[in-house]
Image (tube, rainbow, N blue to C red):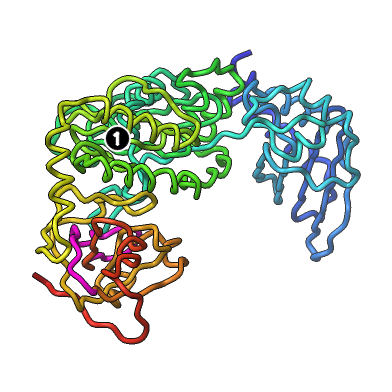
């Protein structure tokens, strides 16, 4: 059976017969009849309400021939996807006009609620697609809850010009990009769509954007997700990317029931399960100490900042960073034109990865002379001139350089006052008293302890202007110091101050 046995004409003929039967049996002074039939497996009940010409309402006994006709109608309307209706409501008005509606989803207002066995019987007599079984029927029949299906939005919203936005998502790491793309495109299509769409980010492009939806049984996503990642670098929802990692980048088998559930979510017939919260990975105190020690050892041996990077990607440099996923650290070379290549060893702790990076850099003796000269320069007289420093990078757990524009090495002169939200182990400060809306920091940063400092001796820094981000307008001047705030406090270059502060120089 692929659909209802009865056509619309067949259904109309049965209802015509029922209406005629009722009109013939009703008393002569009738004005309106309301009839409701409720069915669950072998449990059948009906109620009637009769209104006469004098405005009196009363119950009325349904002719015994009417109910079999209505049950025959129910059988003829049943189909293997939606099952059979649970309730039929018929309104008959004098002399014989009628309207009828069926309810296929809601639990009827039973006079006597049927026991569980009738709910089980209903699903045996009139099976439904998994996605079409209402929650109340599933509960009454003792069925387990179906596996949840999460819907991954293609974009996060639109801006004032109607252009899709996605700024809050972390980028897909280059080393797993191809695997994520393959997963997105190879998962079964659960809701096909005819034709192709246009590019929402570049309408002038002629490239077709695939439509429809894919699913792996747990998540469902638009077919255009892979297109926008490949062509525009639009990050995939991070919760879906983590799920893909957890599956080892291999799409599991998706049975027919799971495909039906996913299609129902994709089409909007069934609400998707809540998207789990995204919890950006933090850096533990132990890992933070290991990274600070690594930086100190690299400085001790005169390794130039351009040779390496800690956490932040850097072209043509050896980078120590959190491995994609929820845990582990890795070290790999980021090629300027191709990015990282292959699958580096994942170390359990940052200290192990730090040792690996230090060993790799020091093993190569080609930089020994340059490093020795750098150390000699650093050991010059403390009273000598302070110069700007190239290659300054954000320290671990600081915002990336991509959140700032117009990068420029500067010297913060003595007397400059700056501030920051956070502990002394970071190196990002702002012009003192910069409004939060101009800092473009994540909300949780503003919950950290607030400190103000005054520069006592010139400090090398990298200045940048905060870009609009996290629903903030940006525009504030941020400074990444050459070393941590703690280091400059220890050597006296900074002192903590309280009370009013002044703005830093603009040149």
The N terminus appears in which quarter of the rendering?
A: top right
Image position of 160 with respect to 89: above or below = below
Give residue 277's position: percent from left, percent from top.
52, 47
Q: Which residue is drawn at the image coordinates 79% and 54% (left, top)? A: 30
What range of the chain is rendered magenta? 456-475
- Mark 1 Cα-neighbour bin, 10 Å: few <14, some 14–19, many ≥20: many
Image position of 222 with respect to 51: above or below = above
Give residue 316's position: percent from left, percent from top.
18, 32
Q: Which residue is drawn at the image coordinates 26% and 54% (left, top)? A: 403
Image position of 206 with respect to 1: above or below = below
Question: In the drawing, does residue 337 fall left or right of residue 211?
Answer: left
The C terminus appears in which quarter of the rendering?
A: bottom left
Q: Which residue is drawn at the image coordinates 26% and 69% (left, top)? A: 493
Q: Is residue 224 visible?
A: no
Residue 270 is inside the magenta segment: no
Of residues 312 and 325, the one nearer the viewer is 312
Of residues 71 and 376, the one nearer the viewer is 376
Q: Which residue is mark 1?
A: 319
Residue 470 is inside the magenta segment: yes
Q: Main secondary structure of the magenta part?
A: loop
Give residue 229's position: percent from left, percent from top.
29, 32
Which picture quadrant has residue 456?
Answer: bottom left
């Amino acid at each position: 059976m692929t659909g209802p046995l009865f056509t619309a004409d067949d259904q109309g003929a049965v209802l015509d017969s029922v209406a005629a039967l009722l009109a013939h049996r009703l008393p002569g002074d009738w004005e309106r009849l309301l009839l409701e039939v409720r069915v669950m497996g072998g449990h059948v009940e009906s109620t009637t309400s009769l209104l006469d010409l004098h405005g009196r309402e009363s119950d009325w006994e349904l002719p015994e021939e009417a109910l079999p006709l209505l049950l025959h109608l129910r059988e003829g309307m049943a189909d293997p996807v939606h099952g059979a209706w649970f309730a039929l409501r018929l309104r008959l008005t004098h002399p014989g006009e009628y309207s009828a509606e069926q309810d296929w989803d809601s639990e009827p207002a039973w006079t006597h609620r049927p026991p569980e066995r009738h709910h089980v019987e209903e699903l045996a007599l009139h099976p439904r697609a998994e996605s079409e079984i209402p929650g109340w029927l599933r509960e009454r029949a003792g069925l387990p809850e179906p596996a949840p299906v999460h819907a991954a939005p293609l974009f996060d919203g639109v801006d004032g010009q109607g252009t899709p936005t996605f700024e809050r998502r972390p980028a897909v790491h280059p080393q797993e990009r191809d695997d994520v793309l393959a997963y997105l495109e190879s998962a079964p299509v659960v809701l096909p769509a005819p034709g192709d769409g246009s590019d929402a980010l570049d309408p002038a492009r002629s490239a077709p954007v695939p439509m429809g939806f894919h699913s792996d049984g747990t998540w469902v996503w638009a077919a255009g997700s892979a297109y926008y990642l490949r062509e525009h670098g639009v990050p995939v929802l991070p919760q879906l990317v983590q799920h893909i990692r957890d599956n080892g980048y291999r799409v599991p088998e998706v049975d027919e029931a799971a495909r039906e559930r996913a299609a129902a979510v994709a089409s909007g017939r069934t609400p998707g399960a809540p998207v789990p919260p995204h919890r950006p990975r933090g850096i533990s105190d132990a890992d933070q100490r290991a990274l600070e020690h690594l930086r100190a050892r690299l400085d001790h041996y005169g390794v130039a900042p351009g040779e390496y990077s800690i956490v932040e990607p850097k072209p043509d440099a050896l980078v120590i960073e959190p491995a994609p996923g929820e845990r582990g650290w890795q070290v790999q070379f980021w090629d300027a034109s191709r990015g990282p290549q292959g699958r580096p060893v994942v170390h359990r702790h940052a200290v192990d990865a730090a040792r690996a990076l230090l060993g790799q850099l020091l093993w190569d003796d080609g930089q020994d002379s340059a490093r020795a000269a750098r150390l000699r320069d650093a050991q010059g007289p403390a009273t000598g001139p302070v110069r700007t420093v190239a290659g300054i990078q954000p320290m671990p757990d600081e915002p990336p350089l991509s959140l700032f524009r117009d990068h420029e090495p500067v010297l913060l002169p003595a007397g400059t006052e700056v501030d920051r939200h956070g502990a002394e182990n970071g190196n990002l400060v702002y012009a003192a008293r910069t409004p939060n809306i101009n800092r473009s920091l994540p909300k949780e940063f503003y919950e950290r302890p607030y400190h103000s400092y005054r520069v006592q001796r010139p400090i090398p820094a990298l200045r940048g202007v905060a870009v609009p981000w996290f629903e903030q307008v940006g525009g504030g001047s941020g400074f990444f110091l050459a070393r941590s705030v703690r280091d400059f406090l220890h050597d006296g270059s900074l002192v903590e101050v309280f009370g009013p502060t002044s703005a830093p120089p603009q040149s």
